[in-house]
Structures are given as C-alpha cells and as structure tokens.
Amino acid sequence: MKEKYTQSDLFKAHTYIFDNYKELQRSTLCGCYFCEKTFFPYEVKEYVADEDGGLSALCPYCKSLSVVSDASGYRISKALLHKMKKQWY
Ligand SMILES: [Zn+2]
C-alpha cells in the first residue's frame, strides 16, 4: 500500500466513494475525508442508492458522501483524508 499520494492517486481514491457497499464489506478500516474521521465498516449504517442501483456509504459522523475504505488499495490515514479534503472541499 502506498504512503505517498500523487494527484492521480487522489482522483482514483475519490472514485471509491461511489458504489462502495461491497468494498466496505471486505475492508477493515474506512475514513471520511469531509470530517477526516476514521471508523470501522460496521459503523456505517446509511447508504444512498445511485441511478444504477449501486450503494454509496454515508459517513456515520457527518452523513456526507465522502467515505473511502482500505479495500480500495489505499491505506486510510489522516494524511490521505486531509489531502482529499483539500482537493474536494
Ligand atoms: Zn464524515
């Protein structure tokens, strides 16, 4: 897993916030890049359905659609969440 993130890493990681229900089931840690909290997949209780029927996780703390999980191949760290926040918020 990567420790350093390039701009394209950030964009790739961003795509994992959509339709990530299945990913979350096989991940060990998640993070929200809006409130920059980390949490476990079972803490996620709400999902929103997209047009194709995919389910996207909502952060259990701030309810925003900004959840990435380590099943995406990215280590969920404060540094990653912080960089993503700067990029998208
Ligand atoms: Zn959050």
Image (cartoon, rainbow, N blue to C red):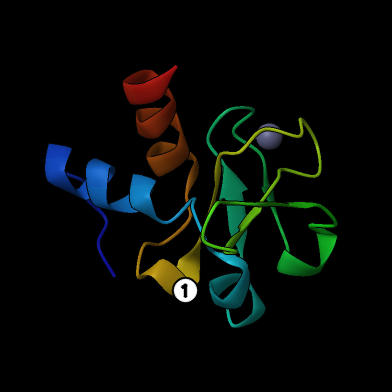
Question: Which x, y percent locates residue 45?
Answer: 85, 57
The picture places residue 63, in percent across and down from the top left corner, at: 76, 34
Location of residue 56 (image quadrant): bottom right
Disc 1: which residue: 71
Residue at x-position 46% and y-position 38%? 81
Q: Write the residue at 60% across / 64% down.
A: 53
- Viewer-side residue, 71 vs 55: 55
Q: Is residue 28 in view?
A: no
| Residue at the bottom extreme of this rendering | 26
Q: Three-letter amino acid code at disc 1?
A: Ala
Question: Please, is residue 62 above or below residue 73 in the view?
Answer: above
Q: Residues within 10 Å of mark 1 (few under 14, many from 20)?
A: some
Q: Is residue 16 above or below residue 86?
A: below
Q: Position of residue 24 (x, y in %)?
A: 61, 70
Q: Quadrant of ligand 1?
A: top right
* Residue 22: quadrant of the picture: bottom right
Looking at the picture, does residue 40 appear above or below residue 23? above
Whole-percent x and y of residue 34? 58, 28
Of the 4 image quadrants, the one containing the N terminus is bottom left
Query: Is 44 on the left or on the right of 52, as rendered?
Result: right
Q: In the image, 31: left or right of 78?
A: right
Q: Residue at x 45, y 16 (%)?
A: 89
> Nearest the camera: 4 or 24?
24
Residue 56 visible in the snapshot? yes
Where disc 1 sits, the SS reads helix
On the rendered structure, is 12 left or right of 63?
left
Please report the residue visible at 48 percent of the width from the left and 67 percent of the height from the top.
70
